[in-house]
Image: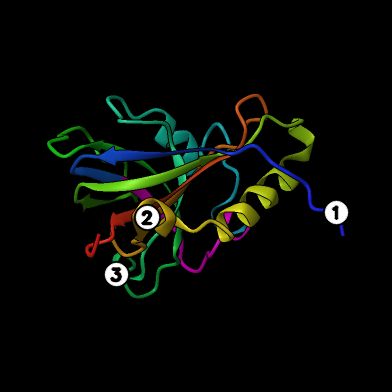
């Protein structure tokens, strides 16, 4: 059986204390379910993603997030669309959106190779397979999925698919 080799850029990112502005789902566990639930939006009634794109002074671009169960109130799904803002953000919070205070943390961020936009499903699947097989202990870390949401940036073929997962330093090293 032949195994395909992939180049995956991996880095540790330090995230400061910050706020997460998010539009929750009721039941979604992934992007497809989220879109079915909240819709794609129209000019008169924009989708949560479009509203997040309009928020000023963000720390990064909008993203899809898988929330730790501890950040999911009863009756909400684990998948949401969100954007990070500074911990002292005092701007307007759009109607229907929530805010979560996030503590400082470290992320292990994975970026796959550029791909043809029409093959985004394949690019995402390949990266997910590599993340599932990745052992952060080799580098002195372990997954810390309760510390912060796992995130995915919008798939864009020219930059490769990007996803991040919280980690912590292994204490006994």
Instruction: Specify which label sits upstream in the sequence, 2 or 3.
Output: 3
In the figure, is residue 80 to the left or right of 100? right
Q: Is residue 139 above or below residue 7?
A: below
In the figure, is residue 1 to the left or right of 128? right
In this view, the residue in front, 29 or 103, is 103
Mark pair 2, 3: CA separation: 10 Å
In this view, the residue in front, 92 or 152, is 152
Name which residue lies at 37% across and 55% down.
149
- Residue picked out by circle 1: 2
Q: Find the magenta span and give its range.
A: 21-34
Mark pair 1, 2: CA separation: 34 Å
- Residue picked out by circle 3: 70
Q: Is residue 53 in sight in this rendering?
A: yes
Q: Is residue 52 above or below residue 98?
A: above
Q: Quick one: quadrant of the N terminus? A: bottom right
Q: Is residue 34 in sight in this rendering?
A: no
């Amino acid at each position: 059986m032949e195994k395909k080799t992939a180049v995956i850029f991996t880095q540790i990112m330090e995230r400061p204390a910050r706020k997460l502005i998010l539009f929750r789902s009721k039941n979604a566990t992934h992007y497809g379910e989220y879109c079915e639930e909240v819709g794609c939006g129209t000019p008169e009634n924009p989708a949560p993603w479009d509203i997040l794109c309009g928020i000023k002074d963000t720390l990064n671009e909008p993203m899809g997030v898988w929330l730790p169960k501890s950040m999911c109130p009863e009756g909400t799904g684990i998948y949401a669309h969100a954007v990070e803002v500074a911990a002292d953000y005092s701007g307007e919070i759009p109607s229907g959106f929530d805010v979560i205070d996030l503590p400082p943390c470290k992320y292990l961020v994975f970026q796959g190779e550029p791909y043809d936009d029409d093959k985004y499903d394949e690019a995402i699947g390949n990266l997910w397979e590599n993340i599932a097989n990745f052992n952060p202990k080799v580098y002195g870390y372990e997954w810390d999925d309760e510390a912060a949401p796992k995130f995915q940036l919008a798939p864009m073929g020219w930059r490769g698919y990007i996803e991040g997962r919280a980690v912590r330093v292994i204490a006994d090293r």
